[in-house]
Image (cartoon, grey):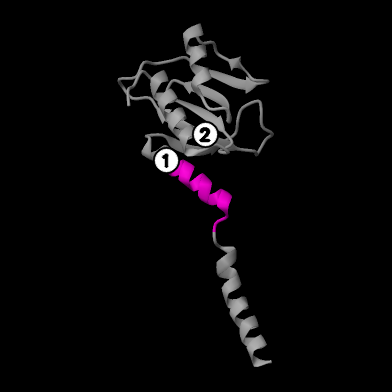
Amino acid sequence: MSYFWIAVVVLAAVSPLISMMPTRRQRKVARLRESAALSGLYVELKPLPGVLEEGQTIAFYGCRRGKQDRSALPALYLHVNDAWRASHGQWDPLRIEWLATLPVPVTAVSEEPGLVGVYWDERGELTDVELIATALKALLDRSG
């Protein structure tokens, strides 16, 4: 009987520690975000204008424009029904072809005078982060 009470006390002491451990999904998202940071991107949770309800956010993986990067007019392209559609702004056809290099989980691409980035649900793999970083740097005319 005393072993039973010892086990109950040990479980009661350990259960808060176990509940604080990150889930498999949280560990995966942390790896994706770390990979983004190592690739020169920054990550923030932002609302997707005109798509998400008020108060909802989605991961935005962005790359800030440097002084050497060419400037651009604001644009937002959404991935709808397996096709890219302009929500606002307009790109030339060569830049629209660039969108095909993005991984499937990407929901939208935003370009602003100070940055360029993608919105996605972070359901991809580390290779998707590498593709996103490469694509964003190509859009900014950077190498590596």
Residue 127 point in image, percent of width and height: 46, 34
Q: Main secondary structure of the magenta part?
A: helix
Identified at 52% across, 23% down, the residue is 110
- Tag 2 residue: 60
Q: Relative to 122, does residue 143 appear above or below in the rendering?
A: above
* Neighbours of disc 1 within 10 Å: few (<14), some (14-19), many (20+): some
> Can residue 30 be found in the magenta stretch?
yes
Q: Outermost residue, left direction?
A: 68
The magenta-colored residue range is 22-34
- Tag 1 residue: 35
> Can residue 10 be found in the magenta stretch?
no
Q: State the separation of the CA atoms marked 1 and 2.
A: 14 Å
Residue 125 point in image, percent of width and height: 51, 38
Q: Is residue 17 left or right of residue 3?
A: left
Determine the image quadrant of residue 68: top left
Nearest the eye: 100 or 92: 100
Residue 123 point in image, percent of width and height: 58, 38
Nearest the eye: 92 or 35: 35
Identified at 48% across, 41% down, the residue is 32
Please identify the quadrant where the C terminus is shown: top left
Q: Is residue 16 left or right of residue 64?
A: right
Amino acid on which disc 1 is placed: Ser
Mark 2 residue element: strand
Amino acid on which disc 2 is placed: Phe
